[in-house]
């Protein structure tokens, strides 16, 4: 465990780096068809590095919400183990479990704020139930509201806040007890795109300056693209793909991941044509993916000059990730089979990922 101090908005914040490791997690529930069991989590093993933003993405019913409840110690697995920094935590005694949960922050899709409390009182709540002295609570609330840029809304009723402001208060509350892990469960799903961008920027800033381990659960690949360094793709209770976001975008393996990538909305930086924009009703035979400087290179034109082939681009766009750029083109490449094979080999030699052979 690595304890560090970080300045944010002129305030010194104490933070702890925590690595999470899951080993063969299994969770089933009753209530399936004809009295059968629902296999919500199927033998999942996963390592979540410390000091990073890790995304867990899946479609509705994939098992991601159950998985995060196991990781965050809200439920026990039927079998398997959960480790924080090498220490097993899924089998803690009741008193130790309560103590460990107090060092976990969580934010949710619907904010889960108390409407009867002001913004500042909501931030104070986790400190109050821990028995923190009043003077320390007041100081800590001031710190947290400053970090989320809402120092002037301390006494505001929750009903007067916008959706983005409510989520900022929820983030401040989640950080109030000085957690070493922050779980974000569909934290931006109820927000408009502009507000989503501001909340993701805030989470990135906090993670970077506090070196928190942040786990983001989402069904939106845009969130993974814009905020995460690593991602695990969950489908039918299993992890079907995991790795660095840049690698997953460039070399997706599972059909679920490919489907997510082909339905991304444009990035703001790339402009109106930055997403996967289709201008043909037909799909292309090949999906080409390329990264960073290759997005500015006329690779296909060079291919056509070198080989006796023709190409037709049916869709395409560039995605700006948190660490790089990845371009996608959906194309047809026509010509003699040998020439097409040579053209594909050339694209690969230039660093282009090719699917559809």
Image (cartoon, rainbow, N blue to C red):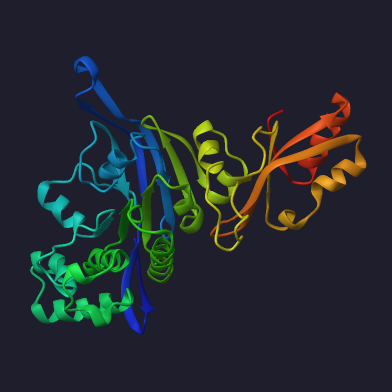
Could you say where residue 355 lies in the image, as x and y percent from the top left? 67, 34
Q: Is residue 266 left or right of residue 237?
A: right
- Residue 186 vertical placement versus 310 (above, below): below
Determine the image quadrant of residue 204: bottom left
Place of residue 199 in the rendered image (x, y in percent of width and height, measured from the top left): 38, 64
Q: Is residue 40 left or right of residue 267?
A: left
- The image quadrant that residue 283 belongs to is top right
Q: Residue at x 25, y 82 (%)?
A: 152
- 179 or 124: nearer the viewer: 124
Mark yes or no: residue 48 visible.
Answer: no
* 243 to the left or right of 9: right
Image label count? 0
Q: Residue at x 42, y 52 (%)?
A: 54
- Give the position of the C terminus as an image quadrant: top right
**x, y (%) of residue 273?**
63, 55
Measured along the vertical axis of the image, is residue 7 above or below residue 61? Answer: below
Q: In the figure, 161 relative to 219: above or below?
A: below
Q: Quadrant of residue 170?
A: bottom left
Of residues 112 and 95, the one nearer the viewer is 112
- Asked whether residue 30 appears in the rendered view, the answer is yes
Answer above or below: position of 33 versus 14.
above
| Residue found at the very far top of the displayed protein | 34
Quadrant the N terminus occupies: bottom left
Q: Residue at x 13, y 64 (%)?
A: 115
Residue 198 image position (x, y, % from top left): 41, 67
Q: Residue at x 39, y 68 (%)?
A: 202
Image check: 184 left or right of 220? left
């Amino acid at each position: 465990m690595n304890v560090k101090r970080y300045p944010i908005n002129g305030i010194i914040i104490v933070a702890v780096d925590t690595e999470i490791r899951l080993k063969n997690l299994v969770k089933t529930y009753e209530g399936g068809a004809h009295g059968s069991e629902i296999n919500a989590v199927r033998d999942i093993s996963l390592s979540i590095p410390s000091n990073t933003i890790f995304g867990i993405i899946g479609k509705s019913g994939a098992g991601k919400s159950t998985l995060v409840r196991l990781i965050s110690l809200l439920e026990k697995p039927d079998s398997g183990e959960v480790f924080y920094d090498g220490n097993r935590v899924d089998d803690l005694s009741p008193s130790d479990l309560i103590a460990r949960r107090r060092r976990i922050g969580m934010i949710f899709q619907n904010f889960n704020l108390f409407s009867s409390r002001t913004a500042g009182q909501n931030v104070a709540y986790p400190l109050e139930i821990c028995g923190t002295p009043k003077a320390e609570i007041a100081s800590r609330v001031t710190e947290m509201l400053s970090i989320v840029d809402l120092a002037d809304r301390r006494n505001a009723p929750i009903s007067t806040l916008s959706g983005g402001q409510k989520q900022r208060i929820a983030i401040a509350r989640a950080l109030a007890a000085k957690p070493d892990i922050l779980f974000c469960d569909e934290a931006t799903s109820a927000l408009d795109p502009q507000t989503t961008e501001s909340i993701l920027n805030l989470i990135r800033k906090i993670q970077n300056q506090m070196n928190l381990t942040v786990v983001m659960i989402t069904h939106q690949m845009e969130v993974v693209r814009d905020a995460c360094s690593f991602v695990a793709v969950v489908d039918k209770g299993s992890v079907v793909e995991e790795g660095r976001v840049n690698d997953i975008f460039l070399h997706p393996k599972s059909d679920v991941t490919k489907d997510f990538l082909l339905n991304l909305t444009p990035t703001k930086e790339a402009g109106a044509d930055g997403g996967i924009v289709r201008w043909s009703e037909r799909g292309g035979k090949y999906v080409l993916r390329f990264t960073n400087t290759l997005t500015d290179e006329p690779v296909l034109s060079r291919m056509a000059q070198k080989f006796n082939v023709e190409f037709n681009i049916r869709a395409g766009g560039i995605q700006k990730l948190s660490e790089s750029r990845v371009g996608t083109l959906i194309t047809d490449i026509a010509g003699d089979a040998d020439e097409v094979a040579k053209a594909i080999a050339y694209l690969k030699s230039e660093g282009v990922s090719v699917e559809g052979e």
